[in-house]
Image: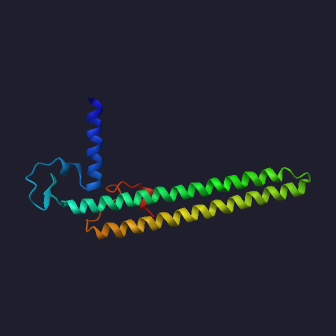
Amino acid sequence: MKLINMKNIALTMILVAILGVSPVTVFAQGDGTGRFEERKDNKQIAALDANAIACIKTAVVKREDALIAGFDTYAAALKSARQIRRDALSAAWDKTVAIERRAAVKAADRAFSEATKVARKTWNETRRSIWNTFTADRKACNVPTVSSVDTGSSATDSSI
């Protein structure tokens, strides 16, 4: 029984975040016929209609799927860089002359460093692009300004 109540609370909080309204509004009493609902602090907020909710939900899912795909690409690039570095270091240690070995190790490290910089730069550009697309999608939904907390994003993602 306790697990079911925790699930209901968690689902309610997720719904609150997606809708972009405060918990006070969600649990407020009212007839629900107006476009606006009144909160306990007497401020009015816009109630979202079903189309706006569906639109923002689609935009959020699109954003999250793109972030997952972008991160998968970033992780694959890092994995590849590590594998290439491993092979280059292994080949470097096949060299019997110390000067050649040192040069090969340094070259492997430089190549790894460059590959990780490129991967990180690409990831950051991808993230920015995803967030710009999300912002445009959100605006197309005609939803009032939605904070990063309301759309389920982290502070680091929304600061781009």
Which residue sits at x=29%, y=54%?
Answer: 18
Residue farthest to the right? 97
Q: Is residue 130 left or right of residue 72?
A: left
Q: Is residue 107 left or right of residue 22?
A: right
Q: Nearer the viewer, residue 62 or 26?
A: 62
Relative to 27, say whether 6 is above or below: above
Q: Nearer the viewer, residue 148 or 73?
A: 73
Q: Is residue 2 left or right of residue 152?
A: left
Which residue sits at x=68%, y=59%?
Answer: 113
The structure's colour scheme is: rainbow
* Quadrant of the rendering where the C terminus is positioned: bottom left
Task: Residue 59 in the image: state x and y as whole percent.
Answer: 34, 62
Task: Residue 128 in the image: state x and y as whole percent.
Answer: 47, 66
Task: Residue 80 in the image: state x and y as whole percent.
Answer: 65, 55
* Quadrant of the rendering where the N terminus is positioned: top left
Q: Nearer the viewer, residue 71 or 105?
A: 71
Task: Residue 146 in the image: state x and y as whole percent.
Answer: 30, 61
Which residue sits at x=62%, y=64%?
Answer: 118
Relative to 69, say whether 139 is above or below: below
Quadrant hosting residue 101: bottom right
Q: How many marks?
A: 0
Which residue sits at x=46%, y=68%?
Answer: 129
